[in-house]
Amino acid sequence: MRVAHRGTSREINRQILLNLVRAWQPVSRADLARLMGTRRGAISLIVNDLIADGILYEGAKGETARGRKPKFLYIDSRKRSVIAVDVRPTRTFVMVTDLLTEPVVGVSSFPTQRDAGRFLKTLGARIRRILEDHKDLGRCEGIGLVVPGMVDSTGACISFAPRLGWRDVPLRDLLEKESGLPVHIENSGRACAIAQVWGVRREAGRSSDFVFLSVSDGLGIGFVVNGEIVRGRHNVAGEFGHTPLDINGPPCACGANGCWEAYVSNLATLSRYFGRDISPRMPIPAEIASFTVEDLVARARGGDAKAIAALQATARYLGLGLASVVNAADPARIFISGEIIAAWDLLEATVRQALSTRVLAPAATSIEITAVPSPDHPRLRGAAALVTAPIFAAPRVG
Amino acid sequence: MRVAHRGTSREINRQILLNLVRAWQPVSRADLARLMGTRRGAISLIVNDLIADGILYEGAKGETARGRKPKFLYIDSRKRSVIAVDVRPTRTFVMVTDLLTEPVVGVSSFPTQRDAGRFLKTLGARIRRILEDHKDLGRCEGIGLVVPGMVDSTGACISFAPRLGWRDVPLRDLLEKESGLPVHIENSGRACAIAQVWGVRREAGRSSDFVFLSVSDGLGIGFVVNGEIVRGRHNVAGEFGHTPLDINGPPCACGANGCWEAYVSNLATLSRYFGRDISPRMPIPAEIASFTVEDLVARARGGDAKAIAALQATARYLGLGLASVVNAADPARIFISGEIIAAWDLLEATVRQALSTRVLAPAATSIEITAVPSPDHPRLRGAAALVTAPIFAAPRVG
DNA sequence: CATATTTGTCCTCTGAGCAGACAATCGGCA
DNA sequence: TGCCGATTGTCTGCTCAGAGGACAAATATG
């Protein structure tokens, strides 16, 4: 319950305007007035405020068929950058983006240390070096960091990341002290979904109900309803990965049996290829540890029948599990990413076939599934969005 | 995207105020000013508007320790009623409530006809008779009707209700023509959740993330995130009932195998008691059709070991399936209703035990589970809420 | 009866959208 | 080159609604 006060209308319109500029830039005041169905005068007041705050800037004049030329407006992403960090079980990736989560310094990486203290030192040093090497990037607005695990409601603490072996690590405050920058931490799947909420180009089309599925060492899922990310009471909503396909099925890293994740994780796919039954609770055999899903996809494309069969089996389970997601959330769209999605052209038919066997509403079987290729770095863009989203979502104070 | 105009603040505050009156009545203008953190003057303007519109009325003076006595405000539910209809596979129930979904004319029922046309005639006649017999109820605001099945996005058409055998029945327009009243149709589980969102009691309210589970012939589930009911793209969200416990499990009415519903529906529980494997896709044997879950609960309370075992087995599966709901949605609370919930005291420990084996976040294992007893008529109150909720519903804010 | 306290109303001020006027540009055309 | 129409951005009143505060009414207490 938020009571409207005198400035509420302005806050609402300011935020709408900001998002319109992001979606439509370059755009003029008159364009915004038409888009918002309000007067140019009102728009000008808000725009000039935002320019004074350094959030928008006036660029070059635009072109029109007739009449005075408009002054185009842009999000002022000059001299403002964001550091995105993607912590994976084996390696940690770092990228720098602008306020629109567009990369400005490419991806670098280093091995993820299991010891959180040492990891922190390494990451801090890495970030400092990037900031020193690229003084031209301007002010860094903060660090967005995503992990494959659960983050507490305050965003301060990684409560449990099984594949990293971290439990109750207060990473936010530690990293803020180490780097001197504001830090935002989030589950990786959810961050990907946040990036989609805030990253919509106008052609992507305003989908306010969707699911982002990241298939990797585990399943990361972000889940958006009515344009808002679903967090739940304890900030752990979206763990569809531990919905069972068979409660008596193979063991899962989470401790239960037969979770969807246990059927479709990279480890499950690889162990299927090697014909071995590998529990995620045991150490991984060397022959598998040195072999990746990328390698598997390459072999499948090379005609390796066993590789194709392993991928197809995973595809079927992907579809069967997705059916639960579709039945439960009825999203307008599913985004799917992960190493295995490099072979999406080989997988889609099987996924859809399996999906259709368990989806209730006939209309939902034709759901739009968008494969997000790994070179787009969805997790890193999600990490960056953690920093940029609050800038667009909340009015700046002072 | 809804741009704020001049009257937006007033709209927002009007809706907030209305809901506060409903939750806290009797309540004075000064109370409302304190609750909303705004001035009494602003409150008075809105309140006097609402009184002029006949939505609120001033009742008797209240009591205070010192000072001038306040004039208490109430929702004006005098002379305004709502007809609630609950369509079940075997019988249809009808009740009349006031604007607060409090019953004013008790429940009556008639056998549900499979033929939608004949059903409509019977229901129409029944409603007309109630309105004639109770002219003192005042103006009827509309009819709320709930069905065990899927309703299309417009709310006009029952797209599929397997247990009724209805497909694409445009019931809303037909019933509006038959009765001359506005009609709102919704899935029964979702309607129960809507009734909880708009639930009158202030102590029950304020939970904005919860799940309502109705265990009966099938599983009806309503699913609320950020205080809003989840509808999904095709208005079929919330079908957790068809999340599998085992994709190779027993057949379900939906066509798939091993759905949660196939383990915990009334039919599943009864067939467990009778030691027979009954497919929901086949006709039900007479010995089971004439025996109800209420009877089973009675026998369990009488010490029938087989009855107890059947209930416990269902309880275990209830918990295992609930784990998927908790993992996916991380609700603050679960409401659970249905015939079997009459034995909740016998079931709860088993449900929680099973739940804890599959729930990821330790904090979520202690989730609040509230059993809603059948005499509260949750589905009928849900049906009534379909009519009353739009009157109180707040506009979405930015 | 005087006082303190609480309620509800009224008046003024301010923020913000609404309406329309108007200067500043610009292309097109004679 | 100069006029005309079109479009953009700004400016000046107007109205709506919350903010702040004064004030009368109402009531318990002493």
Image: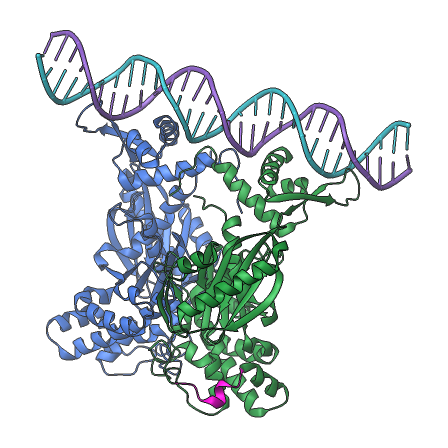
Chain colours: A blue, B green, C cyan, D purple
Magenta segment: B283-292
Tell me, yes or no, whether the highlighted magenta stretch contains residue B287. Answer: yes
Magenta: main secondary structure equals loop
- From this view, report whether residue A391 is shown above or below residue B143: above
- Is residue A3 visible in the rendered image? The answer is no
Towards the viewer: A174 or C15 = C15
- From this view, report whether residue B314 is shown above or below residue C16: below
The residue depicted at 30 percent of the width and 77 percent of the height is A284
Tell me, yes or no, whether the highlighted magenta stretch contains residue A115. Answer: no
- Is residue A229 visible in the rendered image? The answer is yes
The residue depicted at 62 percent of the width and 62 percent of the height is B105
**How many marks can you see?**
0
Left or right: where A257 falls relative to B349: left
Towards the viewer: A249 or A166 = A249
- From this view, report whether residue C16 is shown above or below residue A314: above
Residue C30, x across and y down, in percent: 8, 12
Left or right: where B195 falls relative to B106: left
The residue depicted at 12 percent of the width and 70 percent of the height is A301
Left or right: where A185 falls relative to B65: left
Residue A122, x across and y down, in percent: 35, 56
Hey, which quadrant is residue B153 in on the image?
bottom left
Towards the viewer: A131 or A261 = A261
Residue B372, x across and y down, in percent: 58, 69
Residue B258, x across and y down, in percent: 37, 80
Hey, which quadrant is residue B169 in on the image?
bottom left
The residue depicted at 41 percent of the width and 50 percent of the height is A183
